[in-house]
Amino acid sequence: MEPPAGVTLPVGVERIIVRRSTRRRRTVSARRESDCIIVAMPARTGRAEQDEWVAKLVARVAAKTSGAANPVSDAGLAQRATELSARYLDSRAVPSSVRWVGNQNSRWGSCTPEDASIRLSDRLRPMPEWVVDYVLLHELVHLLHPDHSDAFHTMLNRYERAERAEGFLDGWSHAAHRSGRV
């Protein structure tokens, strides 16, 4: 949908998707997935009320992500991968592509060594930069060691915040499972 009058889309967001549900009675929510913001609301919501909620929730999503130092675009993510490879891997890991994806709900990232492509879950976007760096570095190391061997872990542990990032992700996953979000 076109944004309501006066609503500016955050950087990296190209569209708004409104999903109406007959099962949803009162709650309205929004989340960012890749290059769009998805707003969920009851099916009976009128157009004027919809526009009010969209404006309010787009602003809320924008505020949550505006201070994030995480790369917004795939190009920014690829640049960060180049920087991490240079710093921790002597520039030996050279991905063919690095991109954000919205279809990874059970893993933080994935790598296909055969074509050197790396994908990071959109769920990482609001997380601290050092956590995103850890996941990106994890996938970069897979370009050199496709398994989780001792050599893999030795390279990954060059990242000084590796243990802290693993703890952060474990805690986030635990909280998400307890709240029923995953």
Image (spheres, rainbow, N blue to C red):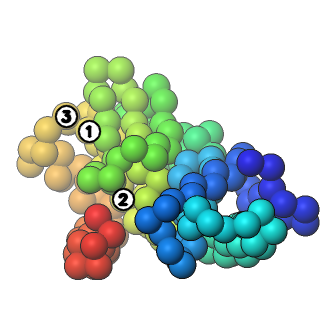
Whether residue 47 appears in this view of the structure is: yes
Determine whether the residue tagged by mark 1 lies in a helix, strand or loop.
helix
In this rendering, the answer to whether 13 lies above or below 43 is above
* Callout 1 crowding tier (Cα within 10 Å): few <14, some 14–19, many ≥20: many
What distance separates the C-alpha of mark 1 from that of mark 3?
4 Å
Determine whether the residue tagged by mark 3 lies in a helix, strand or loop.
loop
Judge left or right: residue 33 versus residue 63. Answer: left
In this rendering, the answer to whether 20 lies above or below 164 is above
Residue 89 in percent (x, y) is at 36, 44
Residue 134 - label = 2
In this rendering, the answer to whether 10 lies above or below 101 is below
Residue 14 in percent (x, y) is at 72, 46
Residue named by callout 3: 146
Amino acid type for the residue under numbered disc 2: Tyr
Quarter of the image holding residue 95?
top left
* Callout 2 crowding tier (Cα within 10 Å): few <14, some 14–19, many ≥20: many
Residue at left offset 49%, top offset 62%: 22
Amino acid type for the residue under numbered disc 3: Pro
Determine whether the residue tagged by mark 2 lies in a helix, strand or loop.
helix
Residue named by callout 1: 142
Residue 37 in percent (x, y) is at 62, 56
Front in this rendered view, residue 27 or 168: 27
Contact between labelled residues 3 and 1, with CB atoms less than 8 Å apart:
yes
Contact between labelled residues 2 and 3, with CB atoms less than 8 Å apart:
no
| Marked residue nearer the N-terminal end (3 or 2) | 2
| Marked residue nearer the N-terminal end (2 or 1) | 2
